[in-house]
Amino acid sequence: MKFGDLALDAAQGSILAHSVALPKGRLKKGRVLTATDLDTLRTVGLTHITAATLEPGDIGEDEAATRLAAALVPDPERAGLRLGRAATGRVNIHAEGPGIVEVLADRIHALNALHPMITVATVPEWQRMDARGMVATVKIIAYAVPEAALDAACLAGQSALRLRPATCATAELIQTTLEPDEDGAKGQKVTKARLSRLGVTLAPQHMVPHETDPLAEAIRASTADAILILTASATSDLADTAPEALRRAGGTVTHFGMPVDPGNLLFFGEIQGRPVIGLPGCARSPALNGADWVMERLLCGVPLQPRDIAAMGVGGLLKEIPQRGRLREA
C-alpha cells in the first residue's frame, strides 16, 4: 500500500486518508474516491489530497478483518461466539451466552507479532462473560495489509478463541456452624448470585455442625453437579475439618491454598467426578476473590492443577475486602 500526498488526477480509486470539509457537509476519511468526488474536491480549490492506494497483493481493511476473525473462530456456533460485521477495519467478537473465555494466548501473541497493522485484542484469559459481552476485537490499523502477512496471521491465530459455558447445571452450598443461631443466609445469597451469572442453579440452603462426620455425610449425600463448602471457621490445614470431611466422604483433595489475596484459604478436589470447592471466608462478600477464579473454571469444566493455581499469583493481589476479619495492613 502506498500512502501520502497524491494529485487529484491520479487519485481515483484511492482511499481518502483525512476528511475534507465542503461547503455542504464533508467527504469522510476512508472513502474510496470516485470521479465525482474528485470533481467536488477541485471545486473547493484542491489539487492534491492525502490518500492510500492499494497495490497488487494488498487486501482491504474490512476483508482482512473478516478473514482474520474467521480464522480465530472458524466455527462460531460451536465456539459459542458471534462475529460482527466488518467496519473501518474492525470486527468485534461477542459471547453468545454466559461462560468463561478460553484464549490460546501463544497464538494471539504470535499473530500480533507478525505485522504492526494486524492486531487482535482480547479480554484476559478465563474472563467470565455475560451473554453479548465483547470477547475480542480484530482491528486492521491501515487501510490495507499485504495478503501474505494476513495469511500468516490467520494461520498463527487459528482457533484461538472459544467460550466455555457451564458444564455443571446445579450446585449445592454446604455451610458449617459453630453456634445454633447461625443461619448462613448471607453466604447462601452471595453464592446464589455468583452462580446465576453462569446459569448454574443453587440447591436450597444446607447447614451442618462444624464437625468432620456431619460434613462428610452431607458431602456424600449431595446429588448436585458441584459441591461448595463454606465453613464457620477458616480452613487452616489439609487435615482441617472440611478437607478431612471430603476424604471421609470418599473424595480427594487436589490442592489447598492459593497465591491470591483475598482467597488464600481455599481448597478444591472432587468426589465421583464432581468438583468440590472449599471456599475461603471472603466468599461471603460479593467482591472478587480467588474463589471466583477457581469456581468459574471448575463449573465450566476447565481442569485445574496445582501449577494452574501457582500461576495465579501474578495479578493475584486483588482489592481488599474491608469486611473480612484480618486485613492485610491491620
Image (cartoon, grey):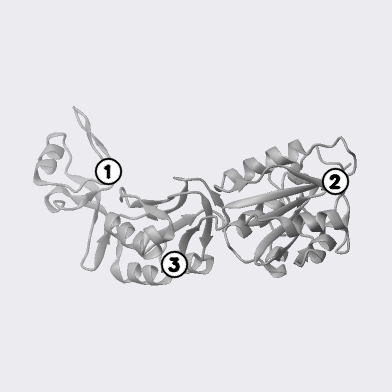
Q: Residue at x 77, y 54 (%)?
A: 218
Q: Give how far apart the Cα atoms at labels 3 and 1 are.
A: 27 Å
Point out residue 252 in the picture as x, y percentages from the top left corner: 76, 68
Residue 232, numbered circle: 2
Q: Which of 154 and 209 lies nearest the eye of the viewer?
A: 209
Q: Is residue 147 visible?
A: yes
Q: Is residue 138 visible?
A: no
What quarter of the picture does the C terminus occupy? top right
Q: Are marks 2 and 3 in contact (CB under 8 Å)?
A: no
Look at label 1 and name its amino acid: Lys
Q: Earlier in the sequence, mark 3 or mark 1?
A: 1
Image vertical order of residue 138 relative to residue 192, above or below: below
Q: Which residue is mark 3?
A: 111
Circles 3 and 1, Cβ within 8 Å, touching? The answer is: no
**Mark number displayed over residue 29:** 1
Residue 269, disc? none
- Give the residue displayed 58% in from the left and 56% down from the top: 168
Left or right, 62 with respect to 229, comes to left
Residue 49, how many percent across, how many down? Answer: 22, 46
Disc 2/disc 3 C-alpha distance (Å) = 49 Å
- Residue at figure coordinates x 80%, y 66% from the top left: 247
Instruction: Categorize mark 2 by other alpha carbons within 10 Å: few (<14), some (14-19), many (20+).
Output: some
Secondary structure at numbered mark 1: loop
| Near-viewer residue (58 or 168) | 168
Q: Is residue 189 left or right of residue 20?
A: right
